[in-house]
Image (cartoon, rainbow, N blue to C red):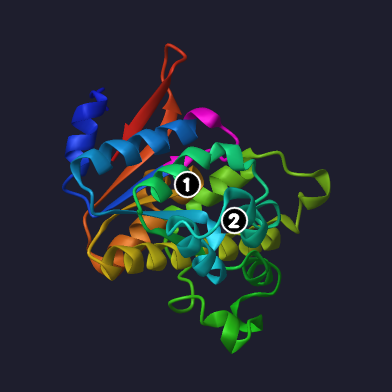
Amino acid sequence: GAAVGFERMIQEMMAARIVHVGETHDAMAMHEIEFQVIRALYARDKHLAIGLEMVPVTLQETLNKWTSGVLTKDEFLREIRWYVTWNFNFGYYEKIFDFAREHRLPIYALNAPREVITKIRMRGWDALSEEEKAYFPGTPDVSNQDHRTLIRAVFESSDIPEAMKGPGLASVFEGLYRSQSAWDEVMGANAVRAAEAEGRRVVVCVGSGHLLYNLGLNRRAYERSKLPFKTVVAVEVPDGKKGLAVS
């Protein structure tokens, strides 16, 4: 729980093969932290890659064309359908994309298509076609009680519409937990795949809810690969300034 300087934090990350950096999607300060971590790690290790929650694996070729310099920015945004695929302002991520292109760092798509995750939430794993199941390393594990308790606490602390309260709340949560687990499972597996593809260190940029207490995709990636990792989540510190929690 003690504070450490940024340089020391980066130095301690050098033992990790996967560095998970959490964000709130519409918080510019957190995207700046992601960028600073990527830039600082690259200064020490040119053999770096970036993994993104924001892009489904179906668009990997578009990421490849961006980093190789084939596409202009406008062409990239059209081809990747950014404002359909992700729907948060590209400006939050622009420095990361530009840095990767400038230094020819691979960017890996980590996610499954949104409609497949929605199908799991609404109808369950068995409703998926074989083609849809192929996006995942297997049936998402929903048995971790600590993770279940965490997601339930987050779910219940949010603003829940009145219509969702009462007897239906449990079934709504089960659907949400299935989708959260599916997200973590596929992104964890793809983060490992990215790290193993060329033996690179990978910086994973993902929503903080997928990383809290090392129970989400970071746990699943480690259980799958045993690759050493670090997790960075931005938090509020008592004096009101942004701080970093590193584990």
Q: Is residue 139 above or below residue 27?
A: below
Q: Is residue 134 above or below residue 140?
A: below
Residue at (27% x, 36% y) in the render = 40
Q: Is residue 173 above or below residue 29?
A: below
- Label 2: element kind: helix
Is residue 89 in the magenta section?
no
Q: Which mark is residue 131?
A: none
Query: Which quarter of the rendered picture does the C terminus lie within?
Result: top left
- Out of 123 and 65, give the one closest to the viewer: 65
Q: Are marks 1 and 2 in contact (CB under 8 Å)?
A: yes
Residue numbers of the magenta segment? 22-29
Residue at (71% x, 56% y) in the render = 84
Residue 131 picture location, percent across and down: 58, 85
Most extreme residue toward the right, as rendered?
Answer: 163
Q: Amino acid at mark 1?
A: Phe
Most extreme residue toward the bottom, as rendered?
Answer: 130
Residue picked out by circle 2? 76
Q: Earlier in the sequence, mark 1 or mark 2?
A: 2
